[in-house]
Amino acid sequence: MNVRFMDTSIVLNLLEIPGKCQDAEKIKLEFKEAVDTREVLILPMATIIESGNHIAHIADGTVRREKAIRFQEFLRKTANQEAPWILYGLELTKNDLLKLAEEFPESALKMQMGIGDLSIIQFYDKYKRDVPAIGRIMIWSTDRHLAGYSENLTTKRRRNR
């Protein structure tokens, strides 16, 4: 089983958000391939929040409304389990929040990475720990600081046993 955590940059390209979709054609092709090969696509809650914020800041009101309605459908399909991805990362425990608090200052200073990206990494790590039989897992992103999260766990798990 191959798993992709979808970052905000991917959703913005899929929805063709103005100024945020320079890789739309490439991302759409890769998305189709991931769906066709039945990869597990995971939509973190942070991605939903960040994507909605980007849509709300579109300068042109007509485009903002059009994209908001498109995102509304995106959310409805997610909620009704009609989308080719699953929602993940809804439960943020006290320990999760404390870990984010601990890591945030350094992350913000050195990598200019926000809480949303940190939470995606945190849930990526949790998913790896909790879900058996993962082959390849990655954070699917056009952002360099997230795109480096990609591992083939088949080999690692065999060695650990």
Image (cartoon, rainbow, N blue to C red):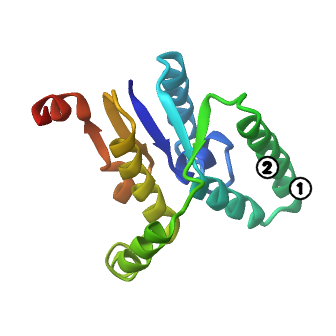
Check the picture and name the quadrant holding the C terminus.
top left
Q: Determine the residue positioned at 72% across, 28% down.
A: 82
Q: Determine the residue positioned at 44% across, 37% down.
A: 4
143 left or right of 57 in image? left
x, y (%) of residue 123?
44, 53
Check the picture and name the quadrant holding the N terminus.
top left
Q: Which mark is residue 62?
A: 1
Q: Is residue 115 above or below residue 146?
A: below
x, y (%) of residue 66?
85, 48
Q: Amino acid at mark 1?
A: Thr
> Helix, strand, or loop for circle 1?
helix
x, y (%) of residue 83?
68, 30
Q: Is residue 136 above or below residue 19?
A: above
Q: Determine the residue positioned at 36% across, 82% down.
A: 109
Q: Amino acid at mark 2?
A: Lys
Q: Which mark is residue 67?
A: 2
Task: Measure the alpha-carbon separation of dots 1 and 2.
Answer: 9 Å
Q: Is residue 72 above or below residue 103?
A: above
> Helix, strand, or loop for circle 2?
helix
Q: Quadrant of residue 10?
A: top right
